[in-house]
Image (cartoon, coloured by chain):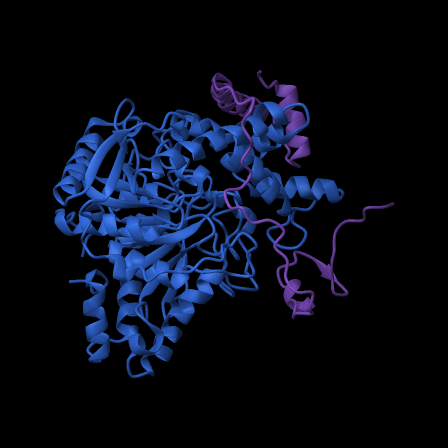
């Protein structure tokens, strides 16, 4: 299974990355190298093997539903590239 | 002799007698950084003012060690993917060049409480993606043993800073070997704790099911002290394990008689440099002389670990790094509309390696390829875990080399990321299984340090430290690195 340059453009779009023609070619090569190498996994029969997503057996870690202090708005906005009226400002989404 | 080379006990004695102050230690560290870091480039940010103020506060108490504990007054380097309130935390990425965290990571809070002094933030591969610290978005780190070679990565700045005695110890993070491999390349000790032992709250996530914070130090005993200070359950990290923390120091007995040690033949054969094998074999012989029982074993699925890792970790990274969009923090690049703003910010902010891993992960998770790549890799991860479980039913620890080679030349692997990925073969399986492992220096090959890796059962850091410490006591200490002839 090889990845084509068109697919690389598509994946870049999904990843919110812009590629130049030259970059697309470079990444097609790099991704194909890794994906080709990954085919090695097909040597193994994993038909009856459970997947591991996590090594710890803990699930659904919840705390008591009590109010706790949260970050003050001013602090939360302190790294904002742009802000207005206590909100993060971005270009208009709707016309 | 540099104050930062003194054994910890000697520092404690001098602090108690007021022959030494926290200010002396901080000034020594800052002077050292001024002298050597132009060449080593281990630091991205040095917080001179904050460190001096902290030292002054410590010097107001009679005996900081009695008041704060064994790490009091020690200058520390913190990897730049660990959040420090009010001190820039960039992950060595241009995208976060201006980011000032509004809170500190739990480990940073714990170190501060223990009296350790943050000197600055250490250089690394961007977002911890890399094995050489060449992928820093700002400048590469150089190995203090040979400035033309890499220090390893991704915690290369932390390892180089400790090896060059710019700080007393450092923190790093390890996703596929990023503490142990640079420790090995720089001739120091690096410990990756069991997944879940140390809180990840405030660690900028790369691959959340694999990342773990740990110490880089000059000795195993120092690593035990730092681990003692940072280990423990944290309600702020839902993957933090609620386990009892033992007294690690009391485990450093030097006695490993009767301990069962497994040596996987896959770690000592093909693909491992002869010079590395030779030093590690010598170390194994010494462990045997100390009374351990050595047996050759097999980890049959280890050869699949790199392939599984380079699907799983990019997949997790592609999701984790989606947050860097230029809206709430980071360096925004304007666009015609919101989507365009995201794309400009990310395309100009991320480096090549980060982009290629995000795309690889996005692809492996995308519909139609998920089963073939991501799910397959998760299943292979199970097989690798089972390999370890089988061995640990019979053995106390597994030992072998940390890396298949010594530190390579800067630029040597620039053309093929895959060639560099393959060199992570001995460290990656440990992360996939979530186990603790340490790298401890075991000699030189081609004049460069070699690391012995000791892998333990989950949450059995005590035995890992005990074996590494026992070995360290009987082996010859490495000479000091020359830092390109500017050693002072």
Quadrant of residue B338 within the rendered picture:
top right
Residue sitting nearer the eye, A71 or B283: B283
x and y, in percent, of residue B56 in the image: 35, 78
Asked if residue B405 is positioned above or below residue B92 in the image, the reply reads above
Asked if residue B235 is positioned above or below residue A58 in the image, the reply reads below
Colour chain A appears in: purple
x and y, in percent, of residue B67 in the image: 34, 78
x and y, in percent, of residue B6 in the image: 19, 63
Looking at the rendering, in which quadrant would you find the N terminus of chain B? Answer: bottom left
Looking at the rendering, in which quadrant would you find the C terminus of chain B? Answer: bottom left
- Residue in the image at 31% along x and 77% along y: B64
Is residue B409 visible from the viewing direction of this image? yes
Decide if residue B201 is on the left or right side of residue B299.
Answer: right
- Residue in the image at 17% along x and 31% along y: B278
Quadrant of residue B286 within the rendered picture:
top left
Asked if residue B102 is positioned above or below residue B321 in the image, the reply reads below
Colour chain B appears in: blue
């Amino acid at each position: 299974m090889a990845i084509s340059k068109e697919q690389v453009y598509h994946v870049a779009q999904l990843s919110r990355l812009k590629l130049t023609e030259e970059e697309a070619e470079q990444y097609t090569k790099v991704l194909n190298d890794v994906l080709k190498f990954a085919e090695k996994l097909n040597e193994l029969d994993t038909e009856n093997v459970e997947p591991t997503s996590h090594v710890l057996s803990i699930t659904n870690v919840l705390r008591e539903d009590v109010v706790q202090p949260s970050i003050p708005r001013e602090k939360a906005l302190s790294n904002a590239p742009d802000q207005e009226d206590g909100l993060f400002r971005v270009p208009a989404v709707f016309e | 002799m540099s104050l930062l080379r003194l054994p910890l006990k000697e520092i404690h004695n001098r602090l108690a007698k007021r022959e030494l102050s926290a200010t002396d230690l901080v000034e020594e560290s800052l002077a050292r950084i001024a002298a050597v870091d132009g060449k080593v480039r281990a630091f991205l940010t040095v917080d001179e003012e904050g460190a001096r103020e902290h030292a002054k506060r410590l010097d107001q108490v009679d005996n900081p060690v009695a008041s704060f504990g064994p790490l009091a007054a020690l200058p520390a380097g913190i990897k730049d993917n660990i959040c420090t309130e009010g001190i820039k935390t960039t992950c060595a990425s241009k995208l976060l060049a201006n980011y000032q965290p509004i809170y500190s990571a739990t480990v940073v809070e714990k170190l501060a409480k223990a009296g350790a002094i943050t000197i600055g933030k250490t250089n690394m591969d961007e977002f911890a993606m890399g094995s050489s610290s060449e992928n820093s978005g700002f400048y590469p780190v150089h190995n203090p043993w040979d400035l033309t070679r890499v220090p390893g990565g991704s915690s290369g700045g932390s390892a180089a800073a400790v090896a060059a005695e710019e700080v007393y110890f450092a923190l790093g993070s390890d996703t596929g070997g990023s503490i142990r491999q640079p420790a090995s390349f720089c001739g120091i000790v690096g410990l990756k704790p069991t997944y879940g032992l140390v809180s990840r709250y405030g660690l900028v996530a790369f691959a959340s099911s694999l990342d773990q914070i740990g110490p880089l130090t000059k000795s195993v005993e120092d690593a035990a002290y730092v681990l003692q200070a940072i280990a423990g359950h944290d309600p702020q990290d839902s993957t933090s394990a609620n386990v009892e923390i033992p007294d690690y120091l009391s485990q450093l007995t030097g006695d490993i008689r009767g301990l069962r040690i497994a040596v996987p033949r896959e770690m000592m054969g093909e693909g491992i440099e002869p010079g590395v094998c030779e030093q590690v074999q010598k170390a194994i012989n010494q462990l045997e002389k100390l009374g351990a029982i050595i047996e050759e074993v097999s980890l049959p699925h280890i050869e699949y670990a790199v392939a599984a890792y380079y699907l799983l970790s990019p997949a997790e990274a592609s999701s984790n790094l989606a947050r860097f969009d230029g809206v709430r923090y980071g360096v925004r690049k304007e666009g015609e509309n919101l989507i365009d703003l995201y794309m400009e910010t990310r395309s100009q902010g991320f480096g090549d390696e980060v982009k290629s891993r995000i795309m690889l992960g996005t692809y492996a998770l995308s519909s139609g390829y998920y089963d073939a790549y991501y799910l397959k890799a998760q299943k292979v991860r199970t097989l690798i875990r089972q390999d370890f479980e089988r061995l640990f039913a019979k053995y106390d620890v597994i030992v072998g080399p940390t890396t298949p080679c010594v530190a390579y030349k800067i630029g040597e692997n620039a053309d093929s990321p895959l060639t560099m990925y393959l060199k992570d073969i001995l460290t990656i399986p440990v992360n996939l299984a979530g186990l603790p492992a340490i790298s401890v220096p075991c000699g030189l090959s081609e004049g460069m340090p070699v690391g012995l890796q000791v892998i333990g059962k989950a949450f059995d850091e005590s035995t890992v430290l005990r074996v590494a410490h026992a070995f360290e006591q009987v082996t010859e200490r490495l000479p000091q690195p020359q830092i390109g002839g500017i050693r002072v």
